[in-house]
Amino acid sequence: MTIKDIAKLAGVSVSTVSRVLNNHPDVSKDAYNKVMAIVEENNYIPNTSARDLGKATSNNIGVIVRGMSNPFFTKIIYEINERVEKNGYTMVMQQISASDDEIMAGALMEREKKLKGLIFLGGRLDYTPQQVSCIGVPFVCCTFNNKYGTLDKSDYSSVAIDDNQAAYDAVEKLFNEGHRKIAVVLSRPDDGSVSQVRYEGYVRALNDFGLELDDNLVISVNSFNIADAYSGVKEWLDNDFDFSAMFCIADNMAMGAMRALRESDFSIPGDISVVAIDGIEFTEYTNPQLSTFCQPMQRMGKDSVDILIDIIEGRGHHRQVELSTIFRVGATIGTFK
């Protein structure tokens, strides 16, 4: 497929297609959507690096970071870079928004930077063979796996925690302190991301502990960032629902939720207990310190690079690594009286 084919299918000019593919701002939203729908449907990758075909192959390893404002990735990126350089390679990183397609971004980077391999830091959990067919180098999914997808395990690697079990453990921690009305703050319960996996762990825990799922206690804020969690929880609190604890599926969300709780005159943990998952550095300094299930960030970065380089250099094969969380006691969980 060429850009002429795309232009014909989209009903636009070739120059419009070119502007869309090169991220020019002077394109209407309607034209942009038409072109990108055809691009994604056909897994079209523009050959922007044809002029470089005669050059030597690089030692670049690409890292696509999905979610530009997520501080959880900071330590992982640092470890990836250290490990990549230690092995004689160069890290090439690109940050994309949570709404962007990391597979398309990775495929473009592969061709432009002549990558040896790719690490996706954050991403969807539902890849199919057709979707990843545009990637011609080995890749590792770091911090997530392919739980809802159809990839064969021999075709990709992943390094992640058991998100379902971590959520289960968080609810169990609250239950053991006497809490029976436990709200959950998440992106959405059906978005195909770690939000959905952790929500399923929340529901599984409620069922095992004999607690009824109350849809009124499910707080969807449609993202993982602090501001959306703050505004979403702030608005939800106006409903005056009965609850004694809040499970936030990510530390970022917990920081926003805790501010909303304080501004609504709830004390933590006196009135409301809060627990989360991630263990980002900021939350060591919240007041009170956040109780959270910490992910082994440095280990995630190290294992992702080691697996990828073993595959690149012919010493290993694709595998899926599952790591454990460590609970940081913090000071945001109290006993329900």
Image (tube, grey):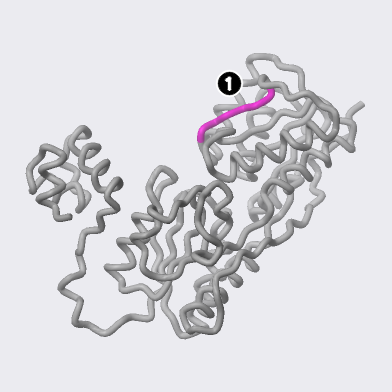
Q: Is residue 287 visible?
A: no
Tell me if residue 60 comes above or below residue 209 in the rendering.
below
* Residue at figure coordinates x 36%, y 68% from the top left: 136
Q: Which residue is drawn at 40% across and 57% down?
A: 132
Is 40 magenta? The answer is no
Of residue 139 and residue 280, the one placed in the foreground of this image is: 139
**Which amino acid lies under the numbered mark 1 shown in the image of this protein?**
Glu
Vertical position of residue 228 compared to residue 304: above or below = above
Q: In which quarter of the image is residue 90?
A: bottom left
Q: Residue at x 71, y 21 (%)?
A: 214
Q: Give the range drawn in magenta.
A: 217-222
Judging depth in this view, the residue of 59 and 319 nearest the camera is 319
Badge 1 density bin: few <14, some 14–19, many ≥20, Cα 10 Å: few
Residue 234: tell me if it is visible: yes
Q: Name the residue under label 1.
A: 235
Residue 176: image location, x then y, percent: 89, 38
Report helix, strand or loop for mark 1. helix
Q: Viewer-proximal residue, 142 or 42?
A: 42
Say if the magenta span includes residue 220.
Answer: yes
Task: Name the spot of residue 160 as percent of width and height, x first.
Answer: 62, 58
